[in-house]
Image (spheres, rainbow, N blue to C red):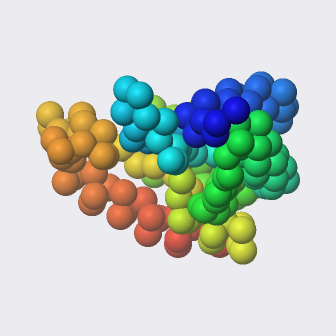
């Protein structure tokens, strides 16, 4: 059997999905591939097939386990189709978890400052954020302050039409000062 890089890559992606479906965690996690590249021709199997993806979780032990298992799967799938594999996962940001006690205190203070009608709780999100490094060292809270108002702030951050109500910057800066002054009381 001649080596088939494309089938090896497809097999690896399917096995990664089977792995994801077999795992459980108290927190959400994902293994996904968004870029596949295999530049052959109609009658030419390419010398290499490449994929790029993401793996995110709030559970660091699960992150380690997934990385180990994906490495094993890459090798297994390559051998099955008489290929070799190069496997690399760049370790991105650690998971960001708010300190529960501090989060309650911040929520109480923010409610006093902006009013209960302006406070909401976001669902758990798997946003990559460098703030996570701080939260691993000291009790921390990561919060979002709305940017909508005066007909602006309706577009998401990573959008060429992004704009914001500059008034939100004044309010968010005032809230940060309020929190800094009052959190230690």
Viewer-proximal residue among 136 and 139: 136
Residue 40: x, y in percent?
40, 38
Q: Residue at x 31, y 46 (%)?
A: 157
In the image, residue 53 sits, relative to residue 21, either above or below, namely: below
Write down the quadrant of residue 9 in the picture: top right
Image location of residue 21, percent across then percent down: 77, 25
Location of the C terminus by quadrant is bottom right
Above or below 112: residue 17: above
Q: Nearest the camera: 61 or 17? A: 17
Q: Residue at x 49, y 36 (%)?
A: 45
Is 172 left, or right, of 1 in this rendering? left
Answer whether residue 70 is visible to the viewer in this image.
no
Q: Looking at the rendering, which quadrant does residue 136 occupy?
A: bottom right
Residue at the (76%, 43%) spot, across then down: 79
Q: Which quadrant would residue 25 be assigned to in this image?
A: top right
Quarter of the image with the N terminus is top right
Q: Residue at x 67, y 46 (%)?
A: 83
Up-down relation of residue 33 to residue 185 (above or below): above
- Please state if 160 lies on the left or on the right of 107 as rendered: left
Question: Residue 180 versus residue 7: which sits nearer the camera?
Answer: 7
Q: In this rendering, does residue 49 appear at all? A: yes
**Percent x, y for residue 112?**
51, 48
Left or right: 150 as drawn, with respect to 29: left
The percent position of residue 93, horizontal first and vertical second, equals 60, 61
Q: Nearer the viewer, residue 8 or 93?
A: 8
Give the total number of marks visible in the rendering.
0
Residue at the limit of the structure toward the front, as seen here: 1
């Amino acid at each position: 059997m001649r080596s088939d890089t494309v089938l090896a890559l497809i097999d690896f992606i399917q096995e990664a999905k089977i792995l994801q479906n077999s795992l459980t965690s108290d927190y959400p996690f994902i293994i996904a591939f968004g870029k596949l590249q295999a530049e052959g021709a109609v009658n030419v199997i390419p010398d290499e097939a490449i994929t790029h993806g993401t793996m995110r979780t709030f559970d660091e032990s699960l992150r380690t386990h997934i990385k180990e298992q994906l490495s094993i799967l890459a090798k297994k799938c390559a051998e099955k189709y008489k290929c070799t594999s190069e496997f690399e996962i760049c370790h991105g940001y650690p998971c960001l978890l708010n300190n529960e006690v501090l989060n309650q205190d911040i929520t109480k203070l923010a409610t006093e400052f902006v009013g209960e009608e302006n406070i909401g709780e976001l669902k758990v999100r798997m946003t990559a954020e460098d703030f996570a490094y701080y939260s691993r060292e000291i009790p921390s809270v990561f919060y979002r302050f709305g940017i909508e108002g005066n007909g602006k702030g309706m577009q998401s951050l990573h959008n060429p039409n992004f704009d914001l109500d500059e008034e939100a910057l004044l309010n968010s800066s005032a809230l940060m000062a309020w929190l800094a002054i009052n959190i230690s009381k």
